Amino acid sequence: MNSNNPVFSRGFPDGQRHATFNVATPDATQLQDMYNKPAYAPPRYMTLDDVVVRTGATLGTLVVTGALSWALVAGSPSSGGFALLGALVGFVLALVIAFRQSTNPALILTYAACEGVFLGAVSQWFNTAYPGIAAQAVIGTVGVFAGMLVVYKTGAIRVTPKFTRWMLGALIGVVVLMVANLVASLFTQDGLGLRDGGPVAILFSLVCIGVAALSFLLDFDMIDKAIRRGAPERFAWYAAFGLTVTLVWLYLEILRLLSYLRD
């Protein structure tokens, strides 16, 4: 196309007033290389099914290792060290995953395996002292989880910024009391009395169960927001880790409470 614009005519040979595009035609080899290149694959975003599958894998690992630990601990004189090792390694892995927000499947499944070793041993001890208590704790944990899922879905309790701040404060308070009781128990027999089975211990366990139950609402809200914002598929592993941590804590607190009530 000819142009009368003097700007466009500058630089064209022989006063040429139109542009030419000298595009090299690809040869057969170049065409074949272009054809062999993989097609563009759009990134996979996290879905609710991804979270369900990853959570199932994490809990499945925990249950399998817990069953093995239950069987190995029965009558074993070294069961205490076995359970303590699983608890310590699991605690360290939980801190690493939480602070790094890791989505590494191997790391999260290893954490679940360590927690399974610990829970299997602890459950066996409690069940020996109080027959049937482990099954009761499992049923109670599943019931609380299902109930909080219904509460979240129906909107009976909405996860607002104020609710989130309140929950974080409650979590910090509970952890501080646990650590203080542990330190005090090194100097006195019952520490602060938060785990001695008395009325104060029962009240503290009820508070811990309530905080753990409400923590599920934060987990559900995090998963919903991640799905809406198009989080990558791997984030489902981190969501599964969060749910597993809360389930483990809830199970232990229900187990303690039931043992207090049995006494």
Image (cartoon, grey):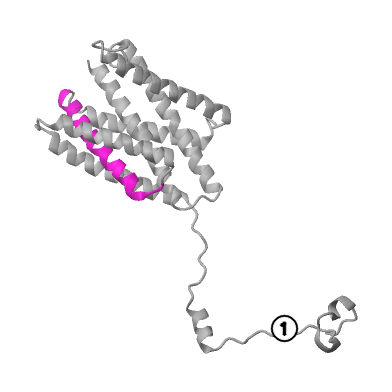
Left or right relative to 43: residue 51? left
Q: Which residues are magenta?
A: 103-129
Q: Please say if 28 is above or below 200.
A: below
Q: Answer left or right for 67 relative to 142.
A: left
Q: Foreground residue, 53 or 169? A: 169
**208 w.r.t. 8: above or below:** above
In the foreground, 189 or 74: 189
Label 1: few (<14), some or many (≥20) within 10 Å? few
What residue lies at 25% left-to-right and 15% top-to-bottom? 186
The question of residue 113 being in magenta is answered with yes
Q: Quadrant for residue 25, please give it.
A: bottom right
Q: Position of residue 71 (x, y in %)?
A: 14, 38
| Residue on which the image places disc 1 | 21
Q: Residue at x 78, y 83 (%)?
A: 19
Q: Which residue is painted at 17% across and 27% down in the image?
A: 125
Q: Residue at x 52, y 48 (%)?
A: 227
69 sits to left or right of 249: left
